[in-house]
Image (tube, rainbow, N blue to C red):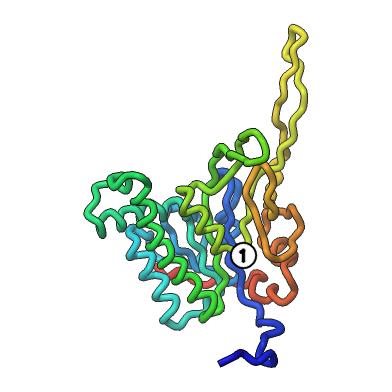
Amino acid sequence: MALKLTRLAQASAPRPPRITVFGVAGVGKTSFAAAALNPVFLLTEDGLGMREVAHFPLVRTYDDCIGHLAALYSEEHDFSTVVVDSLDWLEPLIHTRACRDNGWSSIEEPGYGKGYVAALALWRQYFDGLNALRDERGMTVVQIAHSEIRRFDSPEHEPYDRYGLKLHARAAALVLEHSDAVLFANFRVATVKADVGFNKRVNRAVGSGERLIHTTERPAFIAKNRYALPDTLPLDWDSFARAMPEALQPMLITSVHLPNLT
């Protein structure tokens, strides 16, 4: 049956964003996510420190992760944001499960990248769980990852280094695909010329400790957003939330935190 033009949708209700924030060690990624609206953490690493935020017991297997997502989907709760901290510690758990399912001793055993391809099915199951929380439970999704510097082979220029997600390339591509905003967090750094004697000057990095998130891709790093955000914002949840479209702000603005689940 032909679709009538009168049934075409003109606009859709805003849905909570799926955010990935990655960056250098110690920049404040976990603190950024902990200030989200009523967050609950799925921890694959023990990185909360003394922060008093709700969290599940430490995720030690891939099945733990899927089980926690299922609990958030099926049980009654008041959480508004699910935070996964971190993706690069989740990845080995996914590889372990893929190896168990296929009888491999390591993800490299099948060769030619086949192990990493098999792992993508588990990554997709994980993203299906996150999307169900976003679409059916109205939860904002925040994923945290570390960064690493990788060579980028540009088809237009000579190869150069840039910051990317500390994940296998196939998994990183899937994370980018399933994120509405990918934010690169770093310290503001400037360089100055320093005289080291013998008529020799070198570049030295200086900074005030200011922490920023970058929302738009540049040669030095991966980033993206679907919300026309400013290119650079303070690494602060409220600043980020107030820069988002007005229709999304009630889903993001910080509220009181809830007690731990542990």
Instruction: Tell me if 60 is positioned left or right of 170 in this view.
Output: left
Left or right: 195 with respect to 85? right
Q: How many labels does the image show?
A: 1
Q: Residue 33: x and y, percent?
A: 58, 60
Asked whether residue 34 appears in the rendered view, the answer is: no
Q: Depth check: 68 or 258 in front? A: 68
Residue 126: x, y in percent? 42, 66
Q: In which quarter of the image is the N terminus?
A: bottom right
| Residue pictured at 41% horizontal, 53% vertical | 91
**Residue that protrudes farthest toward the left in the picture:** 103
Identify the residue at the far top of this view: 198
Examine the image and state in which quarter residue 219 appears.
top right
Q: Can residue 150 be seen in this view?
A: yes
Residue 251 in percent (x, y) is at: 64, 75
Instruction: Name the residue rendered at 67%, 54% in the picture.
Output: 235
Q: In this view, does 241 lie above or below 192?
A: below
Specify the quadrant that holds the C terminus.
bottom left
- Most foreground residue, 211 or 145: 145
SS for dot 1? loop
Q: Residue at x 67, y 85 (%)?
A: 9
Residue 251 or 257: which is nearer the viewer?
251
According to the image, label 1 marks what residue? 180
Dot 1: within a 10 Å radius of its alpha carbon, few (fewer than 14), some, or many (20 or more) residues? some
Quarter occupied by residue 68:
bottom left
Percent across and percent down for residue 131 are 50, 72
Residue for point 58% across, 47% down: 23
Kind of residue sitting beneath label 1: Asp
